[in-house]
Image (cartoon, helix red, strand yellow):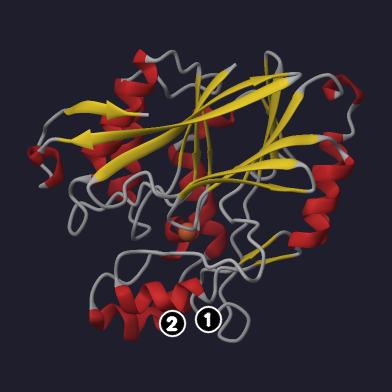
Amino acid sequence: MRIAHLSDLHLCSNFKKSNIAKIKGLIEHALENGAQHFVFTGDISDNAEEKELIQFRDLLQSFSLLHSEKSSIVIGNHDIFGGPQTAQDVLNFPFKCLNVSYKEKVMRFAGHFHELFENTIRPHEEVFFPFIKELKNIVLVGLNSIDEYSRFKNPFASNGRISKANRNIIRSYLTRPKFNDKVKIVLIHHHFYQKSEISTSSENTLWNKIESYTMKLRGKKKLLNLFSENNVKLVLHGHSHEMREYFRKKIRFVNAGACTEEKQASYFMIDAFPFDISVNLHKLDLKEEVLVGNEGSITSIAV
Ligand SMILES: [Fe+2]
């Protein structure tokens, strides 16, 4: 199966106007190049606002991608807590986070894309994560890695956590005999970098520095062991804003977190077969009208 992987779209009609055109261009390019399924690993919106989630829903619909067999999505920290967009926002951010209803935000996010959760196995009809979705020769396991806000444990709302209860659910999915011969792929927002590796965040330099120190995934080691013991072949994620491929415990990790960064737009195209996985980075150069946020097209392509 040919999968296009995009992450960290950070749609924002006030401060990042060009991102929607970049994503549109990437989807067009991926479809022209035979993508059969699209994976979006969180931070769809920059500031957890409904209008951007609706905008993205409309975009998927315009490409006939608002179907479970065509697209899969997981949530990012910006989809729940947003992020500071001005200097004033940085000061107010902890107070804003304290007033966020975590459960409601997750439900609203999933509600906007409810079609993508059809035909998935989930703990309960009203609970959207973790889910498992079977598509031809692959299974996708979608996780919510976003930790709840805490002044002490998650002061910048960018840390992640997978609870023991959710690890048990993931185990129960991955050990089902009917998935034994499928390519097991995990979708998650947070990265699995080692301590020495520096992660990168949004363009705001002050926030960049703060978030970079606080992007940890609690329970990462246990999760990694769980993936390894159950023959997970590939983990698709974002969160840190770069396009990167790496290995942990012989599992291939792909970070598509820089889809909308700088003057380029990028995505990964992945061909997943039982005995062979290939990953190709596509970087698209953008026309000036796209960069300023007007309707425009993407022309030259460097792979
Ligand atoms: Fe993120």
Q: Report whether 21 appears left or right of 266.
A: left
Relative to 211, residue 300 above or below: above
For disc 1, the marked residue is: 155
- Residue 232 position in % (x across, y down): 77, 36
Does 2 appear above or below 110? above
Q: Which of marks 1 and 2 is nearer the N terminus?
A: 2
- Residue sitting at x 38%, y 17%: 31
Mark 2 sits on what residue?
Answer: 94
* Residue at (51, 66) in percent of width and height: 101
Quadrant containing the N terminus in the rendered view: top right
Tell me the number on the disc at residue 283.
none
For the residue marked with disc 1, what is the amino acid?
Answer: Pro
Name the secondary structure under disc 1. Answer: loop
| Nearer to the camera, 276 or 101 | 276
Q: 253 or 90, which lies in front?
A: 253
Q: Distance between the residues labelled 1 and 2?
A: 7 Å
Tag 2: amino acid:
Pro
Picture coordinates of residue 170 (x, y %)?
Answer: 80, 44
Say whether residue 48 is left or right of residue 179.
left
- Label 1–label 2 contact, CB within 8 A: yes
Beta carbon of the mark 1 residue lies under 8 A of ligand 1: no
Label 1 crowd bin: few (<14), some (14–19), many (20+), radius 10 Å: some
Determine the residue positioned at 55% across, 85% down.
Answer: 151
In the rendered image of this protein, does residue 86 appear above or below residue 2? below
Task: Report helix, strand or loop for mark 2.
Answer: helix
Quadrant assignment, res 152: bottom right
- Ligand 1 lies under 8 Å from the Cβ of mark 2: no
User: Percent from the top left, x then y, of residue 257?
Assistant: 45, 49
